[in-house]
Image (spheres, helix red, strand yellow):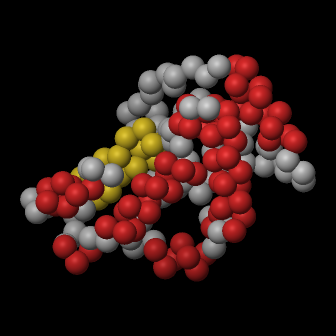
Amino acid sequence: MAEEPKPVNEEDLKLLKERMNIIAGADPSQYHNDFSLRRYLRAFKTVDSSFQALIKTNKWRVEYGVAELENDKELIEKYSDRARVLRHRDIHGRPIEEASKKCFEEVVDNLCIVFDLNSFTLSCMDYQVLKNLIWLLSRHYPERLGVCLIINAPAFFSGCWAVIKGW
């Protein structure tokens, strides 16, 4: 099974929950439960940093309509030939699925993302999109990426990887 996540100071968790409850009109359980709050505390280290990150994430979710994405048939159809959502788990029990859902996994704390580069060409390489994806995962889905697998990579991908791994 997946590694145990680092423990979080329970007093910090309690303080973070209290701060989330104070926000006028905010429903702290709308996107985050104790498991999600612990991930933010592990990723952002302090209650203050975690709280600021959570506020930004909640605002981002509303602004970009994240909750509606999984029901957007047109969007799903448009990108279905470029990305697939697998409803399986990797050998460590991590779900392999889209990150737009509420992060309420209680047993499994992170994901496995697979990039199949079978038809990859240099014209497919979009560094800005990839950089944005890395930023998005680190800021709005902290501590969720368990492993990223790259399969069927052509030999020239090693040059691309030299740039990407620094991010």
Q: Residue at x 63, y 40 (%)?
A: 49
Does residue 71 sit above or below 150 in this rendering? Answer: below
Q: Residue furthest left?
A: 155
Q: Residue furthest right?
A: 25
In this rendering, position of residue 50 left or right of residue 26:
left
Asked if residue 91 can be seen in this view, the reply is yes
Q: Quadrant of the N terminus?
A: top left
Q: Position of residue 52 (x, y in %)?
A: 67, 46
- Which one is nearer the viewer's eye here, 92 or 124? 124
- Which one is nearer the viewer's eye here, 16 or 134? 16
Q: Position of residue 162 (x, y in %)?
A: 18, 54
Q: Residue at x 54, y 50 (%)?
A: 139
Asked if residue 97 can be seen in this view, the reply is no
Q: Residue at x 77, y 28 (%)?
A: 15
In this rendering, position of residue 28 left or right of residue 52:
right
Q: Residue at x 40, y 49 (%)?
A: 113
Please count the marks in the image.
0
Quarter occupied by residue 70: bottom right
Does residue 2 sit above or below 166 in this rendering? Answer: above
Does residue 113 sit above or below 75 in this rendering? Answer: above
Q: Position of residue 19 (x, y in %)?
A: 80, 38
